[in-house]
Image (cartoon, grey):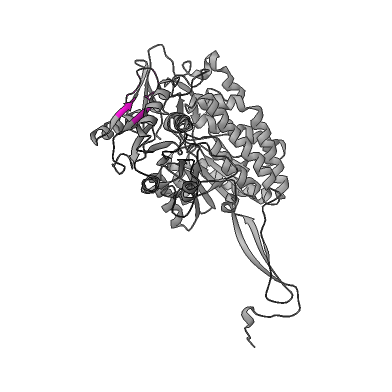
Amino acid sequence: MAAVTYLRTSCRVVAGSPRVYLLRCSKNYSAMSGLLIEDPKYSWLKELGLSAQNEGVYTGTWGATGEEVTSLCPANNQPIAKVKQGSPADYEKAIQATRAAWQEWAEIPAPQRGEIVRQMGEALRKKKTLLGKLESLEMGKIVAEGEGEVQEYIDIADYAVGLSRMFSGNVFPSERRGHMLIEQWNPLGTVGVITAFNFPVAVYGWNSCIALITGNTVLWKGAPTTPLVSVAITKIIAEVLEANKIPGAVCALVTGGADIGTLMAKDERVNLLSFTGSTPVGHKVSMMVQERFGKFLLELGGNNAILVNDDADLEMVVRSAVFACAGTAGQRCTTGRRLILHEKVHDTVVDRLKKAYAQLRIGDPLDEGVNYGPLHSPQGVEHFKLAVADAVAQGGKIEYGGKPIDRPGNFVEPTIISGLAHDAPIVHQETFVPIVYALKTKNVDEAIAWNNEVKQGLTSSLFTRDLANVFKWIGPKGSDCGIVNVNIPTSGAEIGGAFGGEKHTGGGRESGSDAWKQYMRRSTCTINFSKELPLAQGIKFE
């Protein structure tokens, strides 16, 4: 994302080029006094260590030499505060610092590393409410979801503490007398983490906590449009490291745009690059990493479907669909984008969902009682308008919504569109906005085929009371997604399971289960403790 440019003329935000926002202000609207952080209403931001001007690079000390950008609030497009981004020179300093810090970090026993992560979780717990509000202010999700995302980081920290005493290799029987055959897991070195605007806290938490307890250092580049979240989180983590006399560069930060991401992707010193974002950008990242035979972990797009059989609990379906399809204003990678409804219940579900959408409380995500906020950027509004127009042109009927909302900020109506073919181009396109396509199907087998025909394979859900359909759904001829749910929404994954998807979603796995293995390298070790030298397979070489 390019820098934000300010022109003192009128008082609204308009979209410039796809990479530039232009903030036009009145003549008495000064560049500094107009920042929200200086408004008493938002003075709580300073409790997170933020100020009107912030450094966006941390390597054990704070300092940056790159371009200064201004973070905007999606609810009103007003400037919050400024952040100086990292330059290529800052990146070089950061990668050198975090590689040097690894020499010390890798020597610390895993349970002791777990204790440091435990303290990080406790520090985050103390700031949970403030961090949740910051995420609402800068990203645009409602406070409950903002705090929930911070809780997710806290939960994975707790999980990682236990894991620090449990991840293990194997001991195998050796065919040779006096020999031991074992499997040893060691850290990779430095894990680079590139996160997206929609989950600027939790995804870093998933990656960093597991990377840290497995003995790696971390270099983080957050989304260019949520730099204040990145700075605030890093300040909290840095305090814990410094209090324990651990090099701060164990958790380094370089804010910036595609230039910094490209440096990370091409750098052989980044032993694993975890990237969360769109499928097209993820593909480019993976190609750059693969060119150097590096390791990558991709968590990309999702064109997620909720399948509803004719025996489903429709009240549960509607409640789930409201959260899955309209939650976070449709900006989750797990957002429900297709409702594949049995023909016997299609009209009923659509009618009930329309009534439920009408009860959504739309407004400033920081306000109490609001459960539907803005899109993150003006570009999102443009994508929404284009998608609605394409859907109508391809035969869709707008059942609910379909228009931007005439108010400050990046608000659009939550939208339901019916009447499209299951393979219409717009249905197969992931549009990161609150539009769900209601499709009419004849049976579960056809619904499963439609679920699987899109290029992405992140998450999916089937609503049914039929056990035969449940086990078909989770079996080899069922959903081809990485997350396969029954009678719950497509979104809202727990941290205990591995998170990620198949096909164009990237194939990576983060968070729980055995996802820790992606952050380590495996060695098979044969140890001869005898005085003989037998060869495997009984080979004689004399």
Q: Can residue 210 be seen?
A: yes
Q: Position of residue 28 (x, y in %)?
A: 41, 11
Is 223 located above or below residue 522 in the figure? above
Q: Is residue 403 magenta?
A: yes
Residue depicted at 66% across the width and 59% down the height: 169
Is 109 located above or below residue 323 in the figure? below
- Give the tally of numbered discs: 0
In the depicted view, which residue is nearer to us: 105 or 474? 474
Indicate the quadrant containing the C terminus: top left, top right, bottom left or bottom right: bottom right
Q: Position of residue 299 (x, y in %)?
A: 47, 45
Q: Position of residue 125 (x, y in %)?
A: 65, 30
In the depicted view, which residue is nearer to us: 36 or 206? 206
Q: Position of residue 54 (x, y in %)?
A: 54, 28
Indicate left or right for 443 with 370 as reference: left
Q: Quadrant of residue 118?
A: top right
Indicate left or right for 99 with 349 as reference: right
Q: For the view shown, which residue lies furthest in the bottom direction? A: 542
Indicate the quadrant containing the N terminus: top left, top right, bottom left or bottom right: top left
Q: Can residue 270 be seen?
A: no
Q: Is residue 345 magenta?
A: no
The magenta span reads 398-416
Main SS of the magenta part reads loop
